[in-house]
């Protein structure tokens, strides 16, 4: 199986790392390009043993799947750049936030199989939460191929395209929210004078344990929270501060803001559709 990546940012690298770790395809069958950052290309080639090229024909010829992973602001330029090399048999999978299948089809000027996905950078450790949607030209073989690739780097859920902005905000950006939360826990630990390595191990294991409880117990988050919150206890004291600060409402607004931005990015960069 040959996979090509157009775009060499964090999502592309995370996917490549995950695909190699899971033995989904051989290193020599992974190709990648970017607009002009040759240093980045050299780093990726040396780190992962993959193939790098600026030859568009070589990049898309006889390829099973093209992962399109450029920034939304660069979508038009990149799509128009590869358009002459795309055929009806091509299968392009976009991981661009906010960019619709309609826009991609318009810029390619070719009717071909297209999927729109939103993985996250946890793909590098096989723990991505990926949503995916397909246009009508995706064959069953291509659909199975895409699902197998993204399922190998985490979990994959097939959704309607209209849901992609919300999912971008929820799981695409989601890891950053948890990292931000961990930053706060680290700062608190530092203020207590706790040894950094020890506190970090405890914080990470706490998050892993909480995630496993949510996954394995079958209980809702609210139920699990209530079970560990004893009246008058330490957990209740801490949660009271969060509730008084309306932290839950703040997090909800955080996700809504990210969803709005995903939608606005799409509108901004798709405004030239003809």
Image (spheres, grey):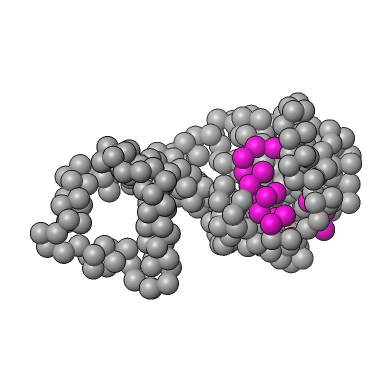
Residue 106 sits in which quadrant? top right
Q: Residue at x 62, y 34 (%)?
A: 71
Range of residues picked out in magenta: 1-21
Question: Compared to 175, does 271 lie above or below?
Answer: above
The spot of residue 28 in percent (x, y) is: 84, 50
The tally of labels here is: 0
Side (left or right) of 237 relative to 17: left
The N terminus is located in which quarter? bottom right
Residue 235 sits in which quadrant? bottom left
Residue 221 magenta-highlighted: no
Q: Residue at x 56, y 37 (%)?
A: 266
Taking depth in this image into account, of 1 and 65 the one nearest to the observer is: 1
Residue 16 magenta-highlighted: yes
Question: Compared to 123, does 96 lie above or below?
Answer: above
The spot of residue 230 in percent (x, y) is: 16, 64
Side (left or right) of 52 relative to 248: right
Q: Is residue 272 visible?
A: yes
Q: Residue at x 32, y 63 (%)?
A: 221
Side (left or right) of 149 relative to 208: right
Taking depth in this image into account, of 38 and 221 the one nearest to the observer is: 38
Q: Residue at x 57, y 41 (%)?
A: 97
The C terminus is located in which quarter? top right
The spot of residue 11 in percent (x, y) is: 62, 43
Residue 258 sits in which quadrant? top left
């Amino acid at each position: 199986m040959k996979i090509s990546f157009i775009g060499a940012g964090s999502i592309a690298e995370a996917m490549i790392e995950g695909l190699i770790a899971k033995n989904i395809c051989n290193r020599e069958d992974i190709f990648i390009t970017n607009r002009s950052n040759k240093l980045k290309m050299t780093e990726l080639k040396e780190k992962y043993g993959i193939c790098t090229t600026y030859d568009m024909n070589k990049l898309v010829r006889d390829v099973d799947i093209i992962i399109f992973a450029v920034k939304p602001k660069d979508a038009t330029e990149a799509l128009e750049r590869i358009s002459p090399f795309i055929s009806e048999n091509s299968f392009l999978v976009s991981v661009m936030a906010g960019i619709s299948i309609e826009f991609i089809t318009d810029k390619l000027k070719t009717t071909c199989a297209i999927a729109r996905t939103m993985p996250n950078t946890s793909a590098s450790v096989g723990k991505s939460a990926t949503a995916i949607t397909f246009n009508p030209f995706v064959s069953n073989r291509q659909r199975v191929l895409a699902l197998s690739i993204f399922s190998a780097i985490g979990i994959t859920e097939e959704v309607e395209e209209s849901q992609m902005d919300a999912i971008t905000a929820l799981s695409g950006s989601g890891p950053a929210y948890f990292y931000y939360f961990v930053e706060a826990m680290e700062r608190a630990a530092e203020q207590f004078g706790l040894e950094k390595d020890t506190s970090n191990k405890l914080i990470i294991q706490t998050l892993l344990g909480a995630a496993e409880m949510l996954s394995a117990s079958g209980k809702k988050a609210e139920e699990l929270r209530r079970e560990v919150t004893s009246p008058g206890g330490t957990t209740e004291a801490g949660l009271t501060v969060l509730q008084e600060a309306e932290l839950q409402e703040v997090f909800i607004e955080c996700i809504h803001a990210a969803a709005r931005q995903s939608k606005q990015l799409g509108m901004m960069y798709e405004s030239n559709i003809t």
